Image: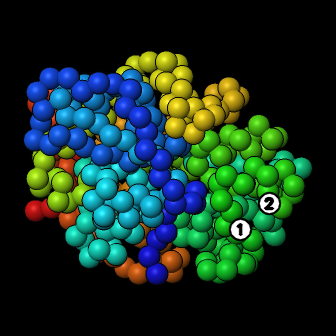
């Protein structure tokens, strides 16, 4: 079995209207099609789209964006050629690469770290020990958060059947959209979920038991990266570099202007989904995310290893999943340190 999507939101994609007009000479393509999720962990894409950072770097090449609800649909679009570049979590990237025999995509850059928390009903769970016998939701069988929680459970010495979720802790796979309803009704006692779902539960009275960032060196782990179809990367390297520069400019702006960036992300969420997040939700969620250019390749290798250990992933051959040459070219031109592919890059 290979990993499923990063987030279990369904499979529909929504085309977004361009808000920034392409100006100047075209690059090697008339347009580039970029996909992302309407999710705070995809804040680089939300803010970069809303504020025009991508289009500025693309000049006369038009940016066309589409919003996806789940990793599998984004991978399908990438494979079908209807999307050229996508923002994805580690699980769908690994899944897509493994399923294609390493022939469909490359991870070309980073976007975000963090934004995942274990939140619980404080009336039922007051400490880690209290989790035993409780019902905890994850977004989807084999997804990034599901694997992380199963691995964490195993480290506690508790036994859970990965496929069924039955064991010392009951792991329930619940669509992020309905986790708040499940929590409100008492169907689950907590959840290991990404933002903004964790903060939506906090708004319902849940408390944070664990921030996943605390489990990783320097608090950093891959949650969202940038991938490109291999064919598009080969045919239009200048366009790929422009998108990467746009992402880099966006991350720098987010980190320099956190309040404005939070507002821009929420405004774009409203534009693509029809509804902004309540202030108490985005105010809780936004500080848990770190926006960065480094794809944190070493943590993806470790995340894949966790999935193998749980039995949800056959040992994948990830050699060549990264092509960080365009990103490192950009970083070198600015005198910034190179980022590592952890030995998983093209040679």
Disc sitting over residue 235 in the figure? none
Looking at the picture, tell me which residue is in the foreground, 48 or 216. 48
Asked whether, in this view, residue 43 is left or right of residue 230, the answer is: right
Residue 173, image x and y in percent?
67, 67
Q: Residues within 10 Å of mark 2 (few under 14, many from 20)?
A: many
In this rendering, does residue 43 appear at all? yes
Secondary structure of the residue carrying tag 1 is strand
Asked whether, in this view, residue 104 is left or right of residue 126, the answer is: left
The residue under the point 25% across, 66% down is 104
- Residue placed under numbered mark 1 in the picture: 172
Q: Residues within 10 Å of mark 1 (few under 14, many from 20)?
A: many
Quadrant of the image occupied by residue 172: bottom right
Quadrant of the image occupied by residue 279: top right
If you read the primary sequence from the N terminus, does the residue marked by circle 1 or circle 2 appear first?
1
Q: Are the residues tagged 1 and 2 within 8 Å (C-beta)?
A: yes
Looking at the picture, tell me which residue is in the foreground, 42 or 81. 81
Secondary structure of the residue carrying tag 2 is loop
Disc sitting over residue 188 in the figure? 2
The residue under the point 61% across, 78% down is 162
Residue 134, image x and y in percent?
80, 65
The residue under the point 62% across, 41% down is 196
Looking at the picture, tell me which residue is in the foreground, 137 or 315. 137
Residue 87, image x and y in percent?
38, 48
In this rendering, does residue 107 appear at all? no
Height in image: 292 above or below 215?
Answer: above
Quadrant of the image occupied by residue 166: bottom right
The residue under the point 75% across, 75% down is 168
Which image quarter holds the C terminus? Answer: bottom left
Height in image: 106 above or below 166?
Answer: above
Residue 230, image x and y in percent?
19, 60
């Amino acid at each position: 079995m290979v990993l499923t999507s990063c987030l279990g939101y369904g499979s529909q994609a929504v085309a977004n209207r361009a808000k920034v007009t392409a100006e100047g000479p075209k690059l090697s393509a008339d347009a580039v099609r970029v996909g992302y999720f309407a999710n705070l962990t995809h804040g680089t894409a939300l803010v970069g789209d809303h504020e025009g950072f991508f289009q500025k770097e693309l000049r006369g090449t038009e940016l066309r964006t589409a919003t996806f609800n789940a990793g599998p649909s984004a991978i399908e679009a990438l494979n079908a050629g209807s999307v050229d570049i996508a923002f994805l979590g580690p699980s769908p990237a690994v899944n897509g690469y493994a399923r294609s025999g390493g022939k469909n995509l490359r991870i070309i850059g980073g976007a975000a770290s963090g934004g995942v928390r274990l939140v619980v009903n404080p009336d039922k769970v007051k400490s880690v020990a209290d989790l035993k016998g409780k019902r905890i939701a994850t977004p989807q069988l084999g997804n990034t958060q599901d694997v992380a929680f199963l691995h964490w459970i195993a480290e506690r010495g508790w036994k859970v059947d990965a496929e069924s979720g039955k064991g010392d802790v009951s792991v329930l796979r619940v669509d992020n959209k309905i986790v708040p309803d499940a929590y409100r009704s008492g169907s689950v006692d907590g959840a290991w979920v990404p933002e903004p779902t964790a903060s939506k539960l906090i708004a319902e009275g849940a408390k944070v038991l664990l921030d996943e960032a605390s489990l990783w060196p320097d608090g950093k782990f891959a949650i969202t990266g940038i991938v490109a179809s291999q064919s598009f990367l080969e045919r239009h390297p200048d366009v790929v570099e422009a998108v990467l520069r746009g992402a880099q400019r966006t991350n720098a702006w987010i980190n320099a202007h956190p309040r404005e960036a939070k507002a821009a992300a929420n405004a774009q969420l409203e534009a693509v989904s029809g509804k902004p997040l309540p202030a108490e939700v985005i105010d809780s969620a936004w500080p848990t995310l770190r926006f960065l250019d480094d794809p944190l390749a070493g943590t993806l290798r470790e995340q894949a290893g966790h999935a193998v250990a749980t039995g949800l992933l056959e040992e994948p051959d990830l050699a060549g999943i990264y092509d960080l040459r365009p990103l490192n070219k950009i970083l070198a031109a600015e005198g910034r340190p190179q980022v590592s592919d952890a030995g998983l890059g093209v040679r």
